[in-house]
Image (tube, rainbow, N blue to C red):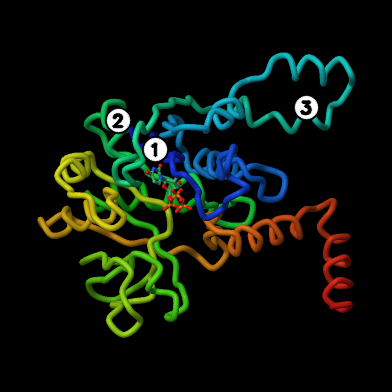
Amino acid sequence: MSIDIAVVPVAGLGTRLLPATKSQPKEMLPVGRKPVAQHVVDELALSGIRRLLFITGKGKNSIENHFDIDGELITYLRQTGREQELAELDFERQEMEYFYTRQRRQLGLGHAVLCARPLVGNQPFVVALGDSVIGLNAESDIVARMVEQFERADADVVVAFEEVPWDDVNRYGIAQPRGPVDDVFELERLVEKPGPTEAPSNLAVAARYVLSPAIFEKLAETAPGKGDEIQLTDAIQLILENGGKGYGLRLRPNERRFDIGNFGSYFRAFTEFALADPKYGPGLREFIRSLVKEG
Ligand code: UTP
């Protein structure tokens, strides 16, 4: 059976979005009409994911509530004839099984993935960061293409990459490809936050991974790195160094990564999704135009 399980870490503190994230998870901030976490789940469903394990933490209960079936609300909307609003809850019934576990200490993304080990066990799996949406309205099948590559090439690691401006490479994990770079390329190494002169490429890790269960061993061996956190990229690097087969997939131009981790990128993501809204987008465009003219 093809890979149908995804781990979605959402346990981070979101300190770069304070005060908005003081008592609500950043993954529940709206981007357009939906919270970020729903965009992520919709995208994964489109790629054939059917089992989803959220790694949650303190203050993240509203994520679980969001994906529950709310019988009371459905009855109320039905009884009051609110068919359109009812349709907005269709996502509750999509073919997906939800699991939740908690990261009890904030030891980084790598540690959050390690928390999935007892549930994932000895099978390959997808990791999708819960604070990043891929493609406008999450209309991307990048994960399906990554799974296909993982299975076709009998790989150990497949990572999604996005081209970023060379001046920004020092903010990301960057790919060192082996051989020519096409939509799919062999991954020799990951370099964490290199300067523009030493960066081997401008291909930045883009929040989606397919991993063999061997990653759990490596995560357990990985010493805390930057910020005293266990880094997922360090464990991937260990796999590659030990002869593991790694591939990169480039995001297509229509599947940009919308990162919700800081206000600059969050504001841009919200604006772009709102502008694409069929009902309110055109009016908003006019409004923004008038604001910009006045300014
Ligand atoms: P970030 O690197 O953006 O960290 O996490 P953060 O803690 O959420 O945010 P800041 O830096 O304090 O503003 C990237 C992804 O990894 C998850 C986050 O929820 C996010 O989806 N994460 C991070 C965890 O699940 N656990 C952690 O310990 C750290």
Q: Earlier in the sequence, mark 3 or mark 1?
A: 1
Cα gap from disc 3 to disc 2, whole angstroms: 34 Å
Q: Badge 2: few (under 14), some or many (20 or more) residues near its Cα, within 10 Å? A: some
Q: Is the shortest distance between ligand 1 and the CB of mark 2 under 8 Å? A: no
The answer to whether mark 3 and mark 1 are in CB contact below 8 A is no
Mark sitting on residue 7: 1
Which disc number belongs to residue 125?
none
> Dot 1: what SS?
strand
Q: Label 3 sits on what residue type?
A: Leu
The local secondary structure at tag 3 comes to helix
Q: Would you name the residue on which mark 3 appears?
A: 86
Query: Badge 3 local density, few (<14 within 10 Å), some, or many (20+)?
Result: some
Query: Residue at the location (21% across, 39% down)?
Result: 216
Residue at screen point 37% across, 52% down: 146
Residue lying at 67% horizontally and 46% vertically, measured from the top left: 30
Percent x, y of residue 227: 31, 55
Do tag 1 and tag 2 residues touch (Cβ < 8 Å)?
yes
Where, quadrant-wise, is the N terminus in this rendering?
A: top left
Of mark 3 and mark 2, the one earlier in the sequence is 3
Give how far apart the Cα atoms at labels 1 and 2 are.
Answer: 9 Å
Residue 55 in sight in this render: yes
Above or below for 26 versus 134: above
| 56 relative position to 243: left or right | right
Q: Which mark is residue 120?
A: 2
